[in-house]
Amino acid sequence: MNRILWADDEIHLLKPYIIYLQEKGYEVTPVNSGQDAIEACQEQRFDIVFLDENMPGLSGLETLQEIKDLHPTLPVVMITKSEEEHIMEQAIGQKIADYLIKPVNPSQILLCLKKHIHQREIVEEHTNTTYRQEFSDITYMIDTATTIEEWMAVERTLTRWELELENVDSAMHEMLHMQREQANTKFAKFIAKNYESWFAQGAKRPLMSPDLMKQTIFPMLDAGEKVFFVVIDNFRYDQWKIIQPLLSEWFTIKEEQMYTSILPTATQYARNAIFAGLMPQQIQEMYPNLWIDEDEEESKNNNEEALIQTQLDRFRKRYGYTYYKVNESDFCEKITRQFKGLKTPLNVVIINFIDMLSHSRTDSKMMRELANDEAAYRSLTLSWFKHSPTAEMFRRIAALGYKVVLTTDHGTTRVDNAVQIIGDKNTNTNLRYKVGKALNCSAKNCFEIARPKQVGLPCPNVSSSYMFCTGNDFFAYPNNFNYYAQFYRNTFQHGGISMEEMLIPLITLEPK
């Protein structure tokens, strides 16, 4: 039974209200002074307090402060005859849950109770009911998707429901998880059927990594726009949706799109393809000094600035540009200070925090505990954005009047099923894709590209092929298989085929 404390110096006049609430199943404790209200809060637990603003002795505002000191989260509804602005401002400043203007009627009181006591149950019931109603529609979307645009619609819908359901105690989580797995299974089949055809001579393909700057950034620059091109490594569509409200404080969302990452969905391939405007094999052939092979030990992304310049030169774009790579908070603060007086039309910023979070979660037991599921992983992303210099960076960009194109090179997916793979000694170490000779995978649903050059991928040897995990699988070698299967289970990985890795956000923001 929900318990209500009602404080009013004319409490006897409120007896009809009290009887009405008791008949609705509420337990009401009436008191006629602020001091009595405070004592009642010291002795009993209440779910909500109705507090008269104008009482002799302790005023409503003074009583409010005392109650908040005792129970900071207890909702207090101020009831007042006065609509004076300073009284309302004081009450709001002291974090009242709501206020009502006398004379109140029973329906107002009941609505207030639903809002502040029963809101969670009402939201949960509505959310569960709505999802059950849409379940078959989502299944139909998954079963009938035949284009990349339709798969993007599936990803948007599933993400929307993941965000809706994570805030409620719902039995629907498992059903939604099942739909996500079903969708990724069919999406992998779609990619296996269509991916190679996208690279055929004269073929029409979706917007992909090497097309990004040519089709998105250059038209803006040609139109005289000033642009920040911000690439957040390992940034998924669901992570974009949770930081969207924060960015909306400074920007208007002009366009929210998705684009398709190339395979492998790994930084070495996808990000270099973005900045060069070329597929990896083309980079290797045209700029061999700027491409780092899998078996080389140096960083695979040290030549990004030079690759940007090659693309500008190829398309005869004479725009000045800046390039920043953010690996830590101190450096983010430093580059933000450099924005003062900025005049270059193109400014490229790479932010590596989320990728670092993903890798540290793999290696650290404590990080796994902090981000033990998808919802927690999103929560860490939100916390980072709110409390790091990154938010200030975006605020400063908006103040400078620059548009922002916010995107990523690839997403990531949580894996939980190890599959055995065999390859030669030079096979790479990535858990979601392998490149090497004589690759042999135990899983039936692995996707193999036997002729890498036909899809724009380097071929280390004549007989090299690429093999990709799908769904929630990850590769492990037969040696110490059980150890690695256990160690990497429930970690976030990328490189393979899933909607989370391949269907990624491309957002255009205009400063307010």
Image (spheres, helix red, strand yellow):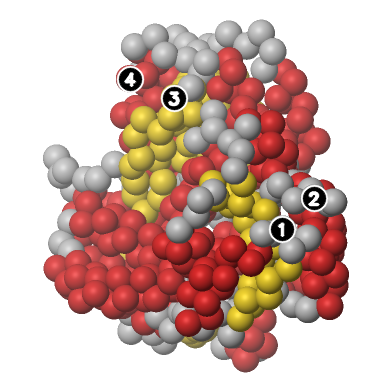
Mark 3 or mark 4, which has the lower sequence index?
Answer: 4
CB of mark 1 within 8 Å of CB of mark 2?
yes
The quadrant holding residue 207 is top left
User: Please, what secondary structure does the residue beneath circle 3 have?
Assistant: strand
Residue 219 - label: 4
Say what amino acid the circle numbered 2 marks.
Answer: Pro
**Taking 181 as reference, is 411 left or right?**
right
Figure quadrant of the N terminus: bottom right
Mark 2 or mark 4, which has the lower sequence index?
Answer: 2
Mark 4 or mark 1, which has the lower sequence index?
Answer: 1
Mark 2 → mark 3, Cα distance in angstroms: 53 Å
CB of mark 2 within 8 Å of CB of mark 3?
no
The residue under the point 51% across, 43% down is: 245
Which-is-in-front pick, marks 2 and 4? 2
Residue 9 - label: 1
Say what amino acid the circle numbered 4 marks.
Answer: Pro
The residue under the point 59% across, 23% down is: 397
Mark 3 → mark 4, Cα distance in angstroms: 15 Å
Mark 1 or mark 3, which has the lower sequence index?
Answer: 1
Which-is-in-front pick, marks 2 and 3? 2
Tell me if I can see residue 391 in this picture.
Answer: no
Say what amino acid the circle numbered 3 marks.
Answer: Glu
